[in-house]
């Protein structure tokens, strides 16, 4: 990433089939309200509009055993058109570790694989401690973290609010660190 704004425009963009990821997106929006420009269903925005934001906080649940939630699936091919080399992406998702232990949170991995190819910088990795699952496509290369925040409304719903609050703080810290590391670029904008 070569360009970063100290007060970046931020979009929360989510896809949700039964409302869990939508609810998480709204909670996150409440927490980060002062920083977030829009909180929108991916079904209600065109993919090219995503490029208007410096930071995309992307929410997606996993469905059909290891597949993307339907609204993300519907626009997935269009994501190839995006130039995200100056953009930051953070991911959060809802899954079910007990019901789908071999494809837990795969949607986050599928989306990050695409966003990475399009040049995005990832923030918001999240440790796997405290989760019980067998396999996930959403792991970092060292296998120690998820590529984003994993929420589980079926098995660990009591942790959701606390996880979202901690993750939101983490995102703010990571964004502040990125801004500090690029003073010359920041000054030029
Ligand atoms: C048919 C079906 C398939 C699912 N497949 C997965 C899966 O592969 N991995 C996973 O972590 N969760 C899986 N889930 C669980 C959903 O991701 C979970 O219910 C989630 O909370 C849905 O969020 P949403 O309402 O935002 O779409 C599946 C659920 C159903 C009903």
Image (spheres, rainbow, N blue to C red):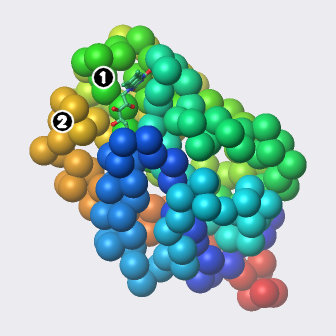
Left or right: 50, with 57 as reference point:
right
Residue at x-position 45% and y-position 62%: 171
Q: Is mark 1 within 8 Å of ligand 1?
A: yes
- Residue 154 occupies which quadrant of the picture? top left
Left or right: 43, with 139 as reference point:
right
Q: Measure the alpha-carbon separation of dots 2 and 1.
A: 9 Å
Left or right: 5, with 21 as reference point:
right
Q: Secondary structure at mark 1?
A: loop
- CB under 8 Å between discs 2 and 1: yes
Quarter containing the N terminus: bottom right
- Residue 75 occupies which quadrant of the picture? top right
Numbered mark located on residue 185 in the image: none
Q: Earlier in the sequence, mark 2 or mark 1?
A: 1
Residue 109, relative to residue 90: is it above or below?
above
Residue nearest the viewer, comparing 42 with 84: 42
Residue nearest the viewer, comparing 48 with 146: 48
Q: Where is residue 56 shown, x and y percent of the image?
A: 60, 60
């Amino acid at each position: 990433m070569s360009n970063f704004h100290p007060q970046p425009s931020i979009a929360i963009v989510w896809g949700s089939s039964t409302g869990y990821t939508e609810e998480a997106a709204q909670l996150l929006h409440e927490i980060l309200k002062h920083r977030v420009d829009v909180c929108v269903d991916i079904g209600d925005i065109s993919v090219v509009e995503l490029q208007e934001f410096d930071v995309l906080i992307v929410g997606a649940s996993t469905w059909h055993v290891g597949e993307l939630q339907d609204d993300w699936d519907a626009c997935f091919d269009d994501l190839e058109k995006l130039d995200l080399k100056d953009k930051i992406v953070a991911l959060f998702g809802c899954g079910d570790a007990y019901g789908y232990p071999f494809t837990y949170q795969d949607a986050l991995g599928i989306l990050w694989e695409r966003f990475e190819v399009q040049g995005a910088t990832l923030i918001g990795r999240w440790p796997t401690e405290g989760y019980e699952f067998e396999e996930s496509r959403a792991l970092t290369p060292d296998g120690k973290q998820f590529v984003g925040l994993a929420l589980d409304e079926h098995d660990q719903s009591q942790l959701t609010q606390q996880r979202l609050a901690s993750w939101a703080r983490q995102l703010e810290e990571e964004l502040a660190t990125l801004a500090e590391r690029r003073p010359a670029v920041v000054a030029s904008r």
